[in-house]
Image (cartoon, coloured by chain):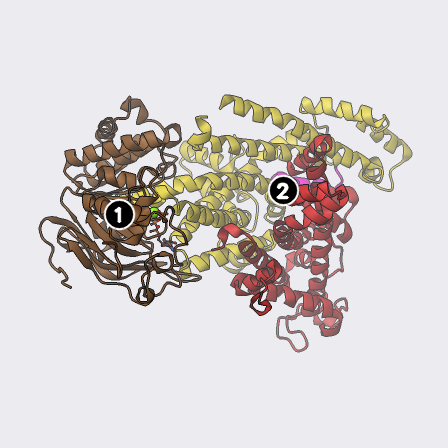
Chain colours: A yellow, B red, C brown
Amino acid sequence: MLSYILKRIGLLIPTLLGVITLVFFMISLSPGDPARVMLGERASAEQLEKLREDLGLDRPLHQQYFSYLSRIVRLDFGKSITTGRPVIEEIGQLFPATMELAFFAMLLASGLGIIIGVVSATKRNTPLDYASMIGALFGVSMPVFWLGLVLIMIFSVGLDLLPTGGRMNIRLYMETFTNFYIIDALIALFRKGDITYLGSALKHLILPAAALGTIPLAIIARTTRSSMLEVLKQDYIKTARAAGIPEGKIIFRYALKNALLPIITVIGIQFGLLLSGAILTETIFAWPGIGKWIYHSISARDYPAVQGGIIIISTVFVVINLLVDILYSVVNPRVRLS
Amino acid sequence: MNDTLIVKDPTPFQEILHELSKNKAAVAGLIIIALFLLIGILAPLIAPKDPFAQEISLRKLPPFSPGYILGSDDLGRDMLSRLMYGARISMIIGVISVGIAMGSGLLIGVTAGYIGGWYDRIVMRLIDIMLAFPYILLTIVIVAVLGPSLFNAMVAIGVSQIPRYARLVRASVLAEKEADYVTAERSLGASPLSLMFLSILPNCLAPVSVQATLGVGEAILSSAALSFLGLGAQPPTPEWGLMIASSREFITNAWWIVTFPGLATLLAVLGFNLFGDGLRDVLDPKLRE
Amino acid sequence: MKKHDQTTTANLLEIQDLSVHFNTQRGVVKAVRDLSLTIKKEETLALVGESGCGKSVTAHSINGLIPVPPGIIEKGKIIFEGENLLQKTEKEMQHIRGVRISMIFQEPMTSLNPVFTIGRQIADVFLTHHDIPREEAFSRAVNLLDMVKIPSPETRAKSYPHQLSGGMRQRAMIAMALASPEPGLMIADEPTTALDVTIQAQILRLMVSLKKRVGMSLLLITHDMGVVAETADRVIVMYAGRKVEEADVYSLFDKPAHPYTLGLLNSLPSNRKYAGASRLEAIPGTVPDLLTINDGCPFANRCPRAGDICRSVFPGETPLTEHHSVWCHNHVR
Ligand SMILES: Nc1ncnc2c1ncn2[C@@H]1O[C@H](COP(=O)(O)OP(=O)(O)OP(=O)(O)O)[C@@H](O)[C@H]1O
Ligand SMILES: [Mg+2]
């Protein structure tokens, strides 16, 4: 088990090195002079020269590459061109917002998705099953950003129930410790007994989490259904029935625990994908996270920021996939004990 | 022997068509796809108005206004006509992106699986690295490098989808490579090229066709997303994602400008997903009785 | 012919005229047709026949495990301790399954849940039927594992199925079947088919001794005549969904009357004594398709003694002795 984990971590390093290399060369070899792009058409020759020197663009490519690598190993992604602050600092500040959004989107998606999938599988070929599966099909066919706009149109503009964007009512000033607003709001609740922060944070979270969670919800529901159907066909389910175990227990304990194995994998993959799906959702809901920041960095051609953001998101993605594989082997005794 | 008694087995292809015609999801999907294809092809003939013609006095007309069944947008252009041309663009995006992805993916997968050795290791390592990027992020990076345009968006989507075909085909090739018919043909002196592309490849096409169908839907969604972010189609192209993007400021007062392009995207992608699911059910022998 | 509509008290189980069909995409599969059988208290009845003849379907009908749809119980009664099980609700059946009737399946590899320890799975059966604390259920599970002669039962109870050998798993399955509070009938559906020959004998001996100890009846499903000879009191031979011969085990091996039974016995490797039909080593021909089967004798197309009538009419019962009947127009005398 331990050697399996170590082997997987060992495989991670060349992959990450590949990611960094690919990002570096793609950006370096892209047409156009980055300094010119960054500074605009009216920049003077000296300004351009200065920036090229700052970025090390005047040196040969392989030198640039190795110095880039050695800086990244020290988590030095350079300074953002638009703000002048170190990229890693900006990411550190924005990351909690994205994680919070992704976490709640995933919570919604896995909770609902598993319930819908299980119900569909046990009520196979009934109108309920058809309705859920058609719903799921719509879910995977929908442009997420459009769904976000429609949700805003209905719940913010039309019904005036929920805010259109942001993480918290701007008139509220909350002391932040973790930058996970739900946690910070809970701290505020315990320290001051004031629930308005928590209420506001949750209200701001609902729509973006729903929009971001829709595709994973649909995919998890479909996976759960097919996985459950597969498991319910197995002999050991027959054994449990023959032993008089009640049907509810058979489905939610005996079958679901087995069906969960492929579901865990899907949840992990979807969680990784959410981080990049957040680029769209955060842009629509003015959610101050990494996604929105990368979007703006791309528009502003802020190369150090783009490079840093992409490498960080890809790293998180790869690490999450690794964690999922490990979790999978922990849940599955056949792998755990071998 | 009595010749009249010999009944020809239906070819597998005919059998698949027959099974498909019994699969409700596949039929529904096919109808939707056909509808969008038809609209796309005939757009210049059937669109009631010029999709680019602005009519400043007739801006933001609600649906069912005379001459504007689906209303007009913020520049007074006919929504219906723009949506019809949008169908044309989306179909082209789907075909070109998937064409790029499938063409390169097949080539990479077949050669990697057949040749093996260090070539296989290097190529599959590269594919693994591509897979280390979340899909939509990879398309964004590629467009960011190539520069925003509709064509570059198609390239980016195509390239991002290569890994799935490469892996799928490589796995099938590895499974087929040692099959008896391949060994037989090899011993008869068939060239590696003809073995790879004429003998082995056709046997891997079932899963590839499912992937391609689903891939078209995904390509349409991705291009809409890229255009929405300003990285794909540029104004005034009537691309659905771009139409949604430029309508953002009107969600308070002109719901139709936001709603219809999204619905069109949803329906088109739904068609490909339905058909792809149906195709998978039919082609996957495990699910068949 | 006389039909018994009343169960005598000596009969634990009585199946009357059971027919079970499956609606499949290709048509209706008539898996079991007009089957009747009885099992007396503490008796072992063997149900034999080759693969696909409807043995498992019969067994599953008894404890209500036929999936509906695609299955339907066309007609018949299954009377267990005087009550027709086919009229019971799912809820009522849960007080019979695992309580009075328990079941052991063919595939020890796949019949235990891979993600729970075997101790936990057996304990769950106790917990379902008794109001006892979890630890108590677990220690009872350990006792049962001891009873089925699993070495070091405390540690084994904490093992997952994949950590046990096939024979051990089958023992665990038997222990699970014994976890029912008042076992009346144990149905063993080919309990030894998937095991090594040496292990087979051990498992059979274990089952027979436990059956005596607990005082229950056993419905033993098999296609192995050797197993029948060793364990059964009475035998029913099935072919393509029909009962073709019924006898006490001595009469059946001594004077098989149905040509199919004869063939079955002849295919036993150690048996060449049924010389009356020495040509029938392995029975030539194939089992008819249950989709297109007609009302004649299903064995007619393979039967060396078949006449015209066999192809159109299924024969009625021919009693040979008090304990021996055959359903055949031209049975072996
Ligand atoms: N769920 C089902 N759907 C359709 N047909 C079924 C189903 N279950 C059983 N059958 C059919 O019923 C017939 C009898 O099957 P059954 O499992 O009882 O055979 P068996 O005698 O137990 O054979 P084996 O020795 O292989 O276990 C078979 O032809 C089988 O195809
Ligand atoms: Mg069976």
Looking at the image, can residue A81 be seen? no
**In the displayed image of the protein, which residue is found farthest to the left?**
C9
The reply to whether the magenta stretch includes residue A76 is no
Q: Position of residue B72 (x, y in %)?
A: 68, 69
Looking at the image, can residue A158 be seen? yes
Q: Which residues are magenta?
A: A288-302
**In the displayed image of the protein, which residue is found farthest to the right?**
A45
Mark 2 — on which chain does it sit? B
Question: In this orientation, which residue lies closer to the viewer: C294 or A128?
Answer: C294
Question: In this orientation, which residue lies closer to the viewer: C150 or A130?
Answer: C150
| Residue density around tag 2, few if under 14, some if 14–19, many if 20 or more, within 10 Å | few
Please determine whether, in this image, residue A286 is positioned above or below residue C78: above
Q: Which residue is mark 2?
A: B179
At a point 62% along the width and 32% down the height, the residue shown is A315
Q: Position of residue C92 (x, y in %)?
A: 20, 52
Please determine whether, in this image, residue C132 is positioned above or below residue A147: above
| Residue density around tag 1, few if under 14, some if 14–19, many if 20 or more, within 10 Å | many
Instruction: Report the Cα–Cα distance between label 2 and label 1.
Output: 43 Å
Q: Main secondary structure of the magenta part?
A: helix
Q: Which residue is mark 1?
A: C47
* Some atom of ligand 1 lies within 8 Å of the CB belonging to the residue at label 2: no
* Residue C325 picture quarter: bottom left
Q: Are marks 2 and 1 in contact (CB under 8 Å)?
A: no
